[in-house]
Image: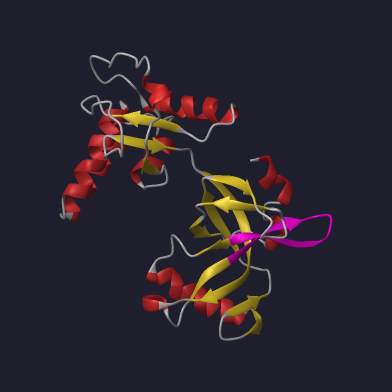
Amino acid sequence: MLLAELVATSAQVAATRSRTAKTAALAAALRAASPAELPVVVSYLSGELRQRRTGVGWAALGSPPPPAPAASLTVRDVDEAFAAISAAGHEGIVAKSLTEPYAAGRRGAGWVKVKPVHTLDLVVLAAEWGHGRRRGWLSNLHLGARDPSGGGYVMLGKTFKGLTDELLRWQTERLLELATERDDWVVHVRPELVVEIAYDGVQRSPRYPGGVALRFARVVRYRPDKRATEADTLATVLAT
């Protein structure tokens, strides 16, 4: 499957309000993908492969490569390129539309930064009460990695992203059941809930006990199939 076909499907789904049309477009893309391509196709169409606007310095424009005469990049190509780029220590790639000119200044939608998504299974240590439309719900989660040497959990950061209203309602009820201490700002809980967190990278941070923080952390799902003792360790986090 060509990456251009995948991008076209994503644009088609975003452009229509018809649930039937959306389902048909997604189904066609999944049928066209090979078994090896399916994980990447699903990740892209579900929004897990993040795309953000970016700029490119003039140094990179000294001798730009000629544009390809036709779309030829496949999903497999992108998957393999991401693996190689990550192994080299880079964050991702910049993709440019064939019709977008090279120009100084802010880039439009024709320039996107695409980065691989990493996930960790972490433990919820506490949660903060939400504000605005989230008032009355526990929203901002305190996330911890398992520390085998100390027998506890080391806080890595917080996130309130990726939470639907349904998930907010459920986690508020569940976390209040696990509460050990609470005030008007935060509710501390027994470390029992495991949550899958997607993130773009790990950076040094003196703010948290683990010495690192997750960049652009967001909730993927809760993991009722996992116990807290099966959560990822701090060593696993540091190795990513």
| Residue extending furthest toward the right | 149
**Magenta stretch contains residue 150:** yes
**Magenta stretch contains residue 210:** no
Residue at 51% across, 50% down = 198
Q: Is residue 90 left or right of residue 235?
A: left
Quadrant of the snapshot with the C terminus: top right
- Give the quadrant of residue 151: bottom right
Residue at 28% across, 26% down = 102
Q: Is residue 130 left or right of residue 17?
A: right
Report the front residue among 121 and 93: 93
Quadrant of the snapshot with the N terminus: top left
Secondary structure mostly seen in the magenta stretch? strand
Q: Please tell me how many numbered marks the rendered image carries.
A: 0
Q: Is residue 20 above or below residue 58?
A: below
State the scheme by which the image is colored: secondary structure
Residue 208, horizontal then vertical, whole percent: 68, 60
Report the front residue among 149 and 160: 160
Q: What is the span of residues highlighted in magenta in the rendered image? A: 142-157
Residue 67, horizontal then vertical, whole percent: 27, 17
- Give the quadrant of residue 188: bottom right
Q: Is residue 29 above or below residue 121?
A: above
Q: Is residue 72 left or right of residue 86?
A: left
Residue at 38% across, 17% down = 62
- Give the quadrant of residue 227: bottom right
Residue 181, horizontal then vertical, whole percent: 67, 83
Report the front residue among 31 and 195: 195
Residue at 23% across, 26% down = 101
Residue 65, horizontal then vertical, whole percent: 34, 14
Q: Is residue 164 above or below residue 40?
A: below
